[in-house]
Amino acid sequence: MIAQILTHTPIWVYGLFIALIIFGIQQARSRTVNAVLAYFLPFGMIALSLAGINSSFGIQPTSLVMWAIGLLLMTSIGFKYFRDDRVTFNRSSRAFFIPGSWVPFFVIMAIFLTKYVFGVMKALDAEILSTPAFVAALSFAYGCFSGYFSSRALNLMIKAKASTSTKTQTDSINITIDV
C-alpha cells in the first residue's frame, strides 16, 4: 500500500518536499535577514495555514475556533518558553540577526507531513475526514503550527521595538552629555 501511495503522489509534491528540506536546513544556520523577509515567513505560514483549513474543510465555525485556540495557545507557549533571546535587530540596516535553529525545520516538516497524510486520506476517501472530532483536531494542529511561527514574529517585533527604544535612550544620553 505504501508503494502505491508513493507512486500515485504527484511529482510536484516531491519537488515541494525537497524545497522545504532545503529551506528548513537554511533555518539551522545563523543569518542576517532583512526585516521584511524576516516577517514574511511567520505571516506567510499563518496565511497558508488558514488556506489549508479552507481547502480541507471550508471556513466553518468549528475549524476556525479550533485553529484560533491552537494559534493563541502555541503563540503564548512559544513566546514564553521558547523565544530566542539571541535574536538582535540592527536599526541602521533594518535587519535581524537570527541564530540558527533546527526547530523551524521540524515544524515545517510536521506541517508538510500533516498535509501529505491528509491528502492521502482524502484520496482514499477515509470516512474519518468528515467527523467533527477530526476536523477539530486537524484545525487545532494547524493553529498550533501557526502559533509557533507567530511567536517568532512576536519575538522579532519586540526585539525591533527594544532596539528603537534603546537607540532613543542612547541619543538622549548623548545629547545630555554634549550639552
Image (spheres, rainbow, N blue to C red):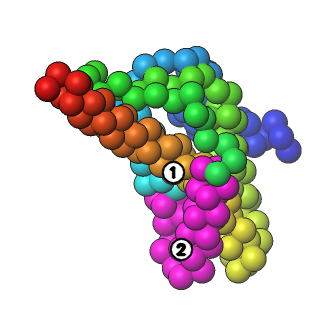
Residue 168: percent from left, percent from top? 27, 36
Report the residue at 41% width, 34% height from top.
38
Q: Is residue 155 visible?
A: yes
Above/below status of 63 relative to 3:
below
| Foreground: disc 2 or disc 1 | 1
Q: Main secondary structure of the magenta part?
A: helix
Start and end of the magenta stretch?
50-79
Residue situated in front as seen by the camera: 140 or 60 = 140
Q: How many marks?
A: 2
Above/below status of 7 relative to 119:
above
Report the residue at 48% width, 53% height from top.
46
As drawn, which residue projects farthest toward the left? 179
Report the residue at 68% width, 59% height from top.
141
Judge from the rendering whether residue 55 lies leftward or rightward of residue 144; answer left or right. left
Residue situated in front as seen by the camera: 108 or 134 = 108
The quadrant of the image that shows the C terminus is top left
Q: What amino acid type should be assigned to the residue bearing mark 1?
A: Ser
Residue beneath label 2, please? 64
Which callout, 2 or 1, points at the residue further toward the start of the chain?
2
57 magenta-colored = yes
65 magenta-colored = yes
Above/below status of 112 relative to 163:
below
Above/below status of 153 relative to 6:
below
Report the residue at 23% width, 34% height from top.
172
Q: Is residue 153 visible?
A: no
Quadrant for residue 5, please give it.
top right
Quadrant for residue 14, please give it.
top right
Judge from the rendering whether residue 123 lies leftward or rightward of residue 32; answer left or right. right
Residue beneath label 1, please? 150
